[in-house]
Image: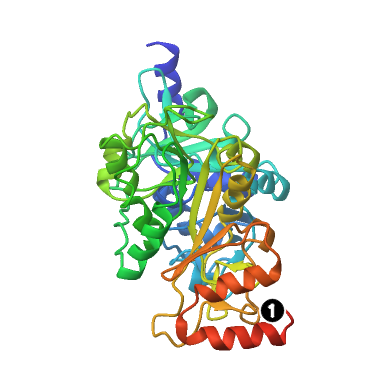
Amino acid sequence: MDRTERLLLQTRCSDASAAVSLAQKHGDVIVPLANGEPGSLLDALDAAGDQLSGVRIHQMYALGDHRYLHGDFPGLRYTSYFLSATTRSAFAEGGIDFTPAHFSEMPHILRYVTNEPVVFAAASPPDRHGWFSLGTNADYTAAFIGEAPVFLEVNRYMPRTRGENSVHVSQIAGWIESHQPLIEIAPPTRSAKDRAIGALIAERIPNGATLQIGIGSMPAAVLEQLGGHRDLGVHTELLSDGFIDLFENGVVTGHRKTTRPGKMVATLALGTQRLYEFLDDNAVVEFLPVDWVNNPRIIGQEECMVSVNGTCEVDIFGQANSEMIDGALWSGSGGQADFAHGAMFSPHGKGFLALHSTTTDESISRIKVKLAEGALVTTLKNAVDNVVTEYGVAELHGQPVSVRARRLIDIAHPKFREQLESDARACGYLHD
């Protein structure tokens, strides 16, 4: 038996009790987002919740539901850095805490707010050299490899991926096996409005551009309309199913990228089983820590970085609220501002924020003179480049308020334009 085999045998645990003890010892537990969640380890924390004291779980985006999300245990508290369908109601009920954060800053923030944390993460089975892969994730977790104790939950359904998200057996405190299929997220349904917005953005993306495409129906509609492009690159926060067809059809090559040429770069992936199978042992995809992937100065090194994200409402100045709906917190800042700034640093970069011109029932304009009362500003007016609705594209970068106002009113729903113009004049934003 060689050293690697001995270490694998020594660190393997029959159950999660060692992980629970580690959590109690360290106090702060860092957990990856989405399918990086180690479900059995978190279940074990739930089961021991009444016996724990001073333990806090830090995670950006939760998929699984647990009792600790509902404030059931005084000694086991949860902090979210981006709300999900699982955690929105928990936050509204006071069961969890929420900390605003740009995705790129997560490693820094976690180092600042934790004290000698431990990492719990899902991983692929080890290879013959003793290396585990964090699979669909690098995110903030990969930044702590070699810096904090790591306890892994090995799942044979987790793809083995490339990049800087590998953990050697010599770097871990323990591991268990728990095999569960990954959660699948189907590509969103695209409406006629989504496709109209997608077409407006796609025609403004040049060949050779490097793409960051966010989550949601409008960004997905952009990907489906890029089939006629050439030599596109990928440097994105989230890798989704929409990129696969572009790669397999030769649209995505990455040949003209500045950083990691030829590689599709991401910090996490979430989609269908087709995506997870595409990722497995695929050398063209690199998962890298989020403080590199989402660093605006790194993003800005690309010759033509194009960022596409959705938003909820935009005011006449260009301020974008992308995380509150009807006065309630819906998500978080994520990486939207990271890529908005990064696209501006790029020599020929372009940033797009997309939204429908109205609410679903067409009763409220999403283009506003002022954001709704109490709304959060996710992306600052200074960082917003182009705003897109089904009625057109408003180019805002470097423009005075009067020009911004006119261009945004022109892409609002026609039935709201007259009132928007009147209100903008009353506020002193329009004078002509």
Residue 81 x, y percent position in the rendering: 58, 58
Please state if 104 lies on the left or on the right of 84 as rendered: right
Amino acid type, mark 1? Leu
Q: What's the residue at 53%, 29% (across, down)? A: 258
Say which quarter of the image contains residue 276: top left
Depth order, front residue of 305/213: 305
Q: Compared to 300, does 382 lie above or below?
A: below
Say which quarter of the image contains residue 322: bottom right
Residue at the spot of label 1: 430
- On the question of residue 252 being in view, the answer is yes
Q: What's the residue at 63%, 88% (across, down)? A: 422
Residue 429 x, y percent position in the rendering: 71, 78
Say which quarter of the image contains residue 295: top right
Q: What's the residue at 37%, 54% (across, down)? A: 222
Query: Alpha-carbon neighbours of circle 1 within 10 Å: few (<14), some, or many (≥20)?
Result: some
Please state if 11 lies on the left or on the right of 22 as rendered: left
Depth order, front residue of 244/119: 244
Q: Compared to 151, does 170 lie above or below?
A: above
| Quarter that holds the N terminus | top left
Please state if 335 lies on the left or on the right of 182 as rendered: right
Element under disc 1: loop
- On the question of residue 376 being in view, the answer is no
Residue 76 x, y percent position in the rendering: 58, 60
Depth order, front residue of 30/343: 343
Residue 101 x, y percent position in the rendering: 64, 56
Q: How many numbered marks have been drawn onto this rendered protein structure?
A: 1
| Quarter that holds the C terminus | bottom right
The single residue placed furthest to the top in the displayed view is 2
